[in-house]
Structure formats: structure tokens, C-alpha cells
Amino acid sequence: MGVHAEFVLSAAAPSQFPADELPEVALVGRSNVGKSSLINALVQNRKLARTSNTPGRTQTLNFYRIWPQGKPRLAAAPPAGAGPDRFTLTGGALQAARESGAFYLVDMPGYGFARVSEAQRRQWARLIEGYLLTRGVLRGILQVVDLRHPPSRDDITMREWIRHHRLPSLCVATKADKIGRTAWPRHLKVIARDLGVGGDAEPLILFSAETGAGREDVWRWVTEQLGRGNING
């Protein structure tokens, strides 16, 4: 049975986050860097997370529940129409999710989008920072960058912030299929130099949503983090 993944909810405030306490792995990165494509490639479902050529489309925290061993038959579905948390699993359904290793991938608003107002930038920054520093079930962070280009100032700032708070993270360089294979080492070297990543403590993985390159490596890191304790508690 293959991986099963489902969109659960979009949250604009902590009060809307799922309350079933399944572990979570967050994705951060610039707008239009390929976070949605990365999610789709990991679960091998191109229709799960919406991809767009319009930067700034993701304006909330989007929660995707992932069932690594396939979704089991659940005893009862959560009741409909019970407010923003109506998709939270409870009872036997929650127990089945825990036993099967279910978790969430959380796609966060992209940073560095110039057309967003300063007020919106500040609001997103508070939402993202609050989530990353206080979310009790968070297990790790995937920082997504574009292999084709040197890291932006926002990429560097995010990496320094992650490092300052000692949060476990993996840097994923996407869109490898957009450049020739012989150019990969040169581009990876620039990213590793500018972000100070590439070692065991802060690994760097090359990834392509089109070819699947790096998929198993990212899954391996995520699986290892799920086996560890929560990073904020």
C-alpha cells in the first residue's frame, strides 16, 4: 500500500491549528520556490498541493495529513460542520493514525514576495515565527531553496534564524531538472557556502519534483525526525 495524503485545513491563526497532536514537519522558503511541488513529489500525488506561477498564493499555514503506510479503515469519521477544527481526528481514528505513523506536512507562507504589503509581511512573520517557536508537536523544518540561483537575503536570514534557535532542519535545493546535471555541483557549492549548510548538523539535499531525485533522501530525513522528540517541548 502506498503513501496516502490528504489536505486537512488552512490556518490563519494558532486557534485554527489541528488539535490531534500528530507530529508535524514544516516547509519554509521563498514564494514560488517549489514547496507545493516538493510536497506533491514526496507523496506522489500531483494534485494534492496546489502549485501556481503566481508568487504569494499561499497566505495561510496549510496542513496535509500524511499516512506513510496508506490510510487505514477508520472506525468513525470526524463530525462535519464543527468549526475550523472539524478535521481533527479523535478516538479510534486518532489511535489508528498514531499506530500507522501519520503526521502533517505544513506548508507555510512564502517569504520575500515584494508585492505583499509591509503589514501583511509582518503578520505572516508573526504567524510563522510563533508557529516555529511554540508549536509543541513540531519535529523539524524543511527549508526549500532554488538550486538555480544563489540564496537570497531572505533565505540567508531564515537560515540564520533557524540556526540561532537550534531548530533541526534540512535544506532542500529544488528544481534540479531545470539545469544540466554537470552544473549541479557548482550550484550546490554556492548554496552550501552562502547558507553555511552541507554537514551532518545542517544537511543539504538536491531535489527534483519532476524526476524524483532526492525524494528518498528527504523521506529518510523526515522519518528520522519523526522518530525524535518534539523540538519545542
Image (spheres, rainbow, N blue to C red):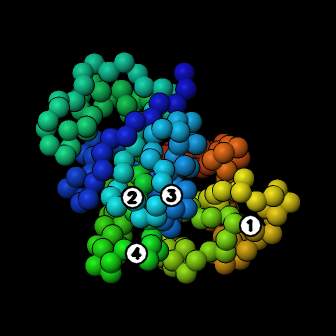
Instruction: Say what secondary structure mark 2 lies in.
Output: loop
Give the number of the mark in front: 4 or 2.
4
Amino acid type assigned to the residue bearing label 2 in the image? Thr
Nearer-N-terminus badge (1/2): 2
Instruction: Say what secondary structure mark 3 lies in.
Output: loop
Residue 188's label in the rendered image is 1
Q: Quadrant of residue 204?
A: bottom right
Query: Which residue occupies 33% across, 70% down?
Result: 124
Quadrant showing the N terminus: top right
Looking at the image, can residue 86 be seen?
yes
Real-space Cα separation, disc 3 to disc 1, in angstroms: 24 Å
Amino acid type assigned to the residue bearing label 4 in the image? Arg
Query: Which residue occupies 14% across, 35% down?
Result: 81
Tell me the residue that label 3 is attached to: 53
In front of the other: 26 or 46: 46
Location of residue 156 in the rendering, given as x and y in whole percent from the top left corner: 56, 78
Amino acid type assigned to the residue bearing label 1 in the image? Leu
Tell me the residue that label 2 is attached to: 58
Location of residue 6 in the rendering, given as x and y in whole percent from the top left corner: 40, 36
Asked whether the residues under the numbered discs 1 and 4 touch, taking CB atoms below 8 Å apart as contact, a structural biologist would say: no
Q: Mark 3, residues whose alpha carbon is within 10 Å: few (<14), some, or many (≥20)?
A: few
Query: Which residue occupies 46% across, 64% down?
Result: 55
In front of the other: 2 or 225: 2
Give the number of the mark in front: 3 or 1.
3
